[in-house]
Amino acid sequence: MIKKDKYYFLSRPRRFGKSLLLDTIAEVFHGDRELFKGLWIDGSNYSFEKHPVIRLDMSNIANKTPEVLERSLITELSKQIRKEALIIESDIPSDIFKLMIEELCEKYNQRVVVLIDEYDKPILDHILDRELALANRDVLKVFYGILKSMDPCLRFVLLTGVSKFTRTSIFSELNNLTDITMDDNYANICGIPVEDMDEVFHENLQELSGVEYFRQFDDLREEILRRYDGYSWDGRTRGLNPYCLLSFFHFKKFRNFWYGTASPKFLIDLIQQDPGEYNSIQEYVMDEDDLDDAFGVDKIHTVPLMFQTGYLTLGEAVSGPKPAWRLKIPNLEVGNAFSLHLAATLTGNEPPAVRKSIQGMDAALRTGDLDGMVAMLKSLFVSIPYELHMKGEAYYHSIFHAVMIHLGFDIESEVSVSGGRIDSVLKYADRIYVLEFKYASCPKKASIERRRKMLEVALDEGVEQILDRGYANRYMGGDRKVIQAAIALVGRDEIDMRIIE
């Protein structure tokens, strides 16, 4: 990478080793060969030529307002200026940055290396406050934009972050970046490949296999992979979350290590605003170009953002004119933790209360007790505060979807068939549920009789839609029993189900 091109961009989720990657590259350019003794690069023909390095971590830069952001940038640059004994007089961050690069290049008679970590944090911290996010973006746009004009003074540039903003957004000035986010050559540049886990942590695995708690698992290695593996940026290779794996071997316990470090409030808020997009995650097909169109401060698409932030990853390849993949939840930790958090937020309940309802639904579905499942679902919906209640089928469908994902069941939502889209398909070892949701808004003071009549009409519509469009046809004729049912909701408090015999 450091020989091929000059300007690079890499997007990876938090806690995936981006900072460690930048630290490693910084030490390479500092020329300290001793640090790499015994490693591949030490035995290569790389000369370890020393270069001045500017290292910025934007997660340490205050960003409450664009003015605070500018002052904090000046403060951070000033630290490095004093360390290098440079003299720069300016109160404009981009000018200081520009002069700093020029003077370092002149002082050492070597081109400068620029490494910027979490480049997008001043925007992501305020992504739901569009005005503030745009103001911070404009500051960064000018600040990063000077790098292009500094080409004669630059040896290497790498920006990393969680999200990839469109080229017409923050990178409109710096449009010569080589994006390696989904480049096959760099698929495992961060994270831990399975084969590396087997080699590096072989003794740790052997040690834990003898611990009584871990004897309950048939294959400890496979359980680790089930919980922490599954990430992919090329659709073929898979990698483990390094923070989770290292934490597991340190604490010798299974926990939601990665998710527990930061709850994705901005992502949950986005799903609240448009729950319908979340319901279609298993049907979402994405190609690399989608990332360029998916994320601008004034235009955010939830599902591609879930991919960028690590809550979804590349799954099976989809044939077409250009490479594309279905997205999927990477592993058990992400599926369980995120879905519980989402269900709790959407319903306004605490996670323990939601978990109790979920466990009741789990027991009912596994025994084929659909009436019991609906009763538990109703108790969950009734608990939703009126101020959180949203009028719409997608809202309730998203809660159901999150619940099923938390249980680890094979669920498909918004499934495309020749006659339309099935709301939900639940697959078990011995049965398949084909479910259609219907929602009808109703005035608060409507009589019980009117509510019941509306409920019957909605159930009739659901049953008719399932039968007329042949939703269950593709699942018939196999070894598993197919159960078709319409679930209807009127307002927040009325819910009923009709099974199609």
Image (cartoon, rainbow, N blue to C red):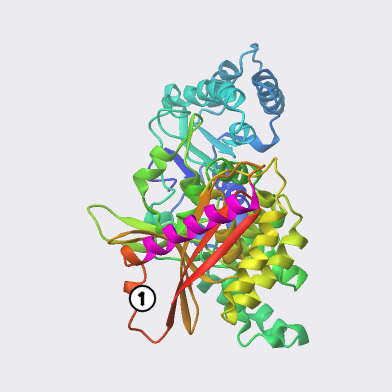
Please say whether residue 205 is visible from this viewpoint.
yes
Q: Is residue 400 magenta?
A: no
Above or below, 124 against 472 in this view is: above
Where is residue 374 shown, x and y percent of the image? 61, 67
Left-right relation of 54 to 252:
left
Category of crowding for the residue at label 1, using alpha-carbon neighbours closer than 10 angstroms: few (below 14), some (14–19), many (at least 20): some
Where is residue 224 shown, x and y percent of the image? 61, 74
Quadrant assignment, res 391: top right
Secondary structure state at the residue bearing disc 1: helix
Report the magenta residues as a range: 447-466
Toward the viewer: 185 or 416? 416
Q: Amino acid at mark 1?
A: Tyr
Left-right relation of 278 to 422:
right
Quadrant assignment, res 136: top right
The residue beneath circle 1 is 475
Magenta segment, prevailing SS (helix, strand or loop): helix
Toward the viewer: 388 or 160? 388
Where is residue 499 shown, x and y percent of the image? 49, 72
Position of the C terminus, as image quadrant, is bottom left
Q: Is residue 453 magenta?
A: yes
Please say whether residue 397 is visible from this viewpoint.
no
What residue is drawn where x is 70% and y is 87%? 216
Where is residue 159 shown, x and y percent of the image? 52, 38
